[in-house]
Image (cartoon, rainbow, N blue to C red):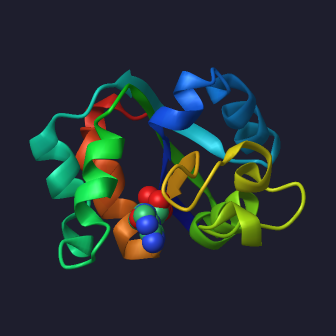
Amino acid sequence: MLQRTLCIVKPDAVKKNVQGSIIQKISDAGFKILGMKMIKLSETMGEKFYEVHKERPFYGELVSFMISGPVVVVALEKENAVTDYRTLIGATDPAEAAEGTIRKMFADSKAENAVHGSDSEENGKIEVSFFFAESELA
Ligand code: CMP
């Protein structure tokens, strides 16, 4: 079943200028890029995007990190996209991420972990539509 999932190349990875390498790896793994843009999130957008984590102790830190610099948001499509993309990026904490995964290669810490990925098929759809109008998607 074709699914959508949202990749955000986070500010740490953009600062290191590795967004091209990350997107190449995603593309090589068979994901179709439906839409892509570099933006700087406003505080309101950051708070809204991560609203599900509002009660977590790291919410404030997470939002201020995500608005600290430009990010690249990429709408992806593939069979089984949600699980396959999460396998490709690796565990949230790069110390626990498998060899060869994007987070193992490019992330610095649990907070500055290079990329975001949607955690379910439903959230994949919601998160893609958070950043892209349907008319913007190829
Ligand atoms: P992401 O996939 O963007 O979704 C929620 C984010 O919260 C997650 O990646 C991590 O970057 C971040 N996160 C999770 N746990 C912690 C933590 N203990 N401290 C700071 N950030 C965290």
Image quarter for ligand 1 equals bottom left
Along the viewing direction, whichever of 29 and 2 lies nearer the viewer = 29
- Residue at 55% x, 62% y: name it: 110
**Dividing the picture into quarters, in which one does residue 136 lie?**
top left
Considering the image in quadrants, where does the N terminus appear? bottom right
> Does the image show residue 1?
no
Residue 86 falls left or right of residue 72: right
Q: Position of residue 99 (x, y in %)?
A: 90, 61
Q: Position of residue 79 (x, y in %)?
A: 66, 64
- Residue at 63% x, 42% y: name it: 32
Q: Position of residue 14 (x, y in %)?
A: 54, 26
Along the viewing direction, whichever of 118 and 99 lies nearer the viewer = 99
- Residue at 62% x, 28% y: name it: 19
Residue 89 falls left or right of residue 60: right
- Residue at 54% x, 24% y: name it: 15
Residue found farthest to the left: 44
> Does the image show residue 114?
yes
**Dividing the picture into quarters, in which one does residue 106 lie?**
top right
Q: Position of residue 96 (x, y in %)?
A: 74, 72
